[in-house]
Amino acid sequence: MTIGEFARASRLSAKALRRYDELGLLPPARVDAYTGYRYYAGAQVERARLVAWLRRIGMPLAGVRDVCALHGTDPGAAARAVRAHWARVEAETAERRDLAASLLDRLGGTTGVTTTVRPHALLAAALSERGRVRETQQDRAHAGPRLLAVADGYGPAGDLAATAALAAVSGLLAPGGRAGDLLNALEDAVRRADAEVGAAAPGSGTTLTAGVWTGSRLALAHVGDGRAYLLRDGALVRLTRDHTAVQARVDAGELAPAEAAAHPDRALLLRALDGGARARSEPARGAARTTRPASWRTSCPRARPVRRPCGGRSAGPTSGCRRGR
């Protein structure tokens, strides 16, 4: 089948087929050595349609590759991977719904939906371990009735950076009312934390993952490669995305997750709190409405000594803050 015929059969564009060939996701059966034309076998249509369906539900290319690899050998594992992806999509959709309701309220409209939420209590605890490599403990954590936060410092004064970041957000009180107000308050606190880190620990920096609990909503802010998880009904779902060079390549389909776990640049941060002029903070997932009990967990990776602190700047795609695990 020519690429045009295969595109019609699989409902993938010729451009998408060329891209998937480059990524090794859907290579053609034969490539003409003289013309470079791609030719596909009829047996590849099923895999191509699977790729198309997975992309239509918004699955990243790295996830598509994993599901396709599992489809032929372990269909149950492939189904679990799709189920986990869709759980994340539904969580994000619920959060955007809350934000839309907040906007309608702010603009004087009405959501047309009445929701009754029973507040839940937050039981929190924090544990930190220095490990066997570092001479000083550079992790800091806060576990309270309204705020969960973890910071992983790096650089010669990483402990001071992490302490300053948590001090800046620990006084945050969860505002009532709109979900948007909650996000704005948390984002302002993260910006203050960035400035405090720059003042307290020049030449060093820290990651920060923080969640503010209102009794019915949890708002998350995330910078770096700390992580927040949701444990519900026996399933553990990661709510944050690592701001690392390796994760960016995984998202682009250039690296498999298994390769990323052992990649030498897995600790190269693209975002961090360091007080730099280009430092960026990002609300991780907006305000999440919780209507039934769940367990929230934050963590930071175990670190090696810093190989190259990022100083007073935030990293772009070709440069970054290198912090080990």
Image (tube, rainbow, N blue to C red):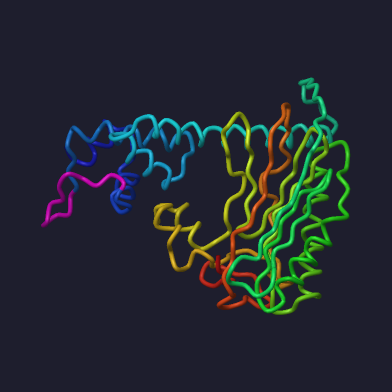
**Which portion, as a residue range, is magenta?**
25-37
**Was residue 245 drawn as part of the magenta stretch in this picture?**
no
Q: Residue at x 45, y 32 (%)?
A: 80
Answer yes or no: is residue 204 visible.
yes
Predominant SS of the magenta segment = loop
Answer yes or no: is residue 323 visible.
no
Q: Residue at x 55, y 69 (%)?
A: 324
Residue 141 position, x and y percent, is: 75, 57
Q: Quadrant of residue 94?
A: top right
Residue 269 position (above or below residue 95):
below
Residue 178 position (above or below residue 314):
above
Residue 179 position, x and y percent, is: 79, 38
Residue 258 position (above or below residue 306):
above
Residue 28 position, x and y percent, is: 21, 45
Q: Nearer the viewer, residue 303 or 230?
A: 303
Q: Quadrant of residue 43?
A: top left
**Quadrant of the drawing holding the N terminus:** top left
Q: Is residue 173 left or right of residue 72?
A: right
Residue 318 position, x and y percent, is: 51, 71
Q: Is residue 36 left or right of residue 88?
A: left
Q: Nearer the viewer, residue 36 or 322?
A: 322
Residue 285 position (above or below residue 80):
below
Q: Count up the numbered dots.
A: 0
Q: Residue at x 42, y 47 (%)?
A: 62
